Structures are given as structure tokens and as C-alpha cells.
Image: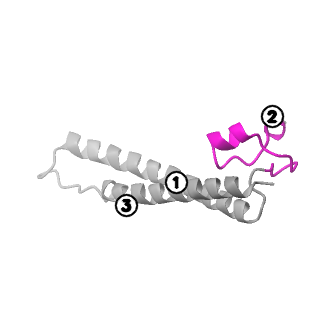
Amino acid sequence: MIKDSEYTKYKKLIERLLQELTAEDELGQSSQRTVELDQQSVGRLSRMDALQSQAMAQAQQRRRDVLKSSLIFALQRLEEGEFGYCADCGDEIEEARISASLVIMKCMSCLKG
């Protein structure tokens, strides 16, 4: 079971990461807007660059959305006392793995198997 000090540490880390992702979402909104197709105001190559930038911003948004969902689930597991335990076998997940990624849900044995 996670100790109280570890619980607080992980909860703060997860909440901070969620706040950072939300701030990044707000910054990325302008990059995802529809690209104007008016060739009079923007050249063809500039428009292609804008379309490529838009696609990259949308891909980054999708990655942030997946990470946010995973962090919300990790927070839920923390509240339920399941955080830090393998979702498959129930064994404790190594501290180093949790520290590397707060969304880890499997121990190394189950990950390999």
C-alpha cells in the first residue's frame, strides 16, 4: 500500500501534470484553427506549411488527450488504493517504474508476458 507521504507526492505530481497539459491545450488552440484557402492572401507553399502545422498541432492535441485520460485514471487508482499495483497480477510495481511514468499500470513480469 502507498504510504501517506507517497500518496500526497503522487497526487500533487499528477495534478500538476494535468494542469500543465490543460495550459498546453489552451496554447495549442490557435494552431488548430481552420486554414484559409484564399490563395490571394497566402501563397500555395505558405498554405501547405499552415496545413502541416495544423496537422501537427492536432496530433499533439490527441497525444495530450490520451495522456490526460491516463493521468485521470491514475488519480482515480490512487484514490481507490490501487495505484502502484499491477492491474494484471496485483503485485507492487517497482518505484523506479512509477517514478519514470505515473501512468504505468503493469509490473515488468506482466509487461513481458
Name the magenta segment's main secondary structure.
Answer: loop
Work out whether mark 2 precedes mark 1 in sequence or the reverse, and give the earlier one: 1
Element carrying mark 3: helix
Q: Is residue 86 magenta?
A: yes
Asked if the residue at tag 1 contacts the one at tag 3, i.e. Cβ–Cβ closer than 8 Å, the answer is no
Element carrying mark 2: helix
Q: Is residue 101 magenta?
A: yes
Give the quadrant of the N terminus: bottom right
Q: Which residue is mark 1?
A: 17
Horizontal side of 111 relative to 14 (left or right) equals right
The one nearer the camera, 104 or 45, is 104
Work out whether mark 3 precedes mark 1 in sequence or the reverse, and give the earlier one: 1
Work out whether 58 lies above or below 80: above
User: Which mark, by number, is residue 45?
Assistant: none
Instruction: Tell us which disc is closer to us: 3 or 1.
Output: 1
Give neighbour class at mark 3: few <14, some 14-19, many 20+ (Cα, 10 Å): few
Q: Which residue is mark 2?
A: 112
Farthest residue to the front: give it.
Answer: 5
The one nearer the camera, 7 or 68, is 7
Q: Report the span colored magenta.
A: 85-112
Q: Work out whether residue 66 can be spotted.
A: no
The one nearer the camera, 90 or 66, is 90
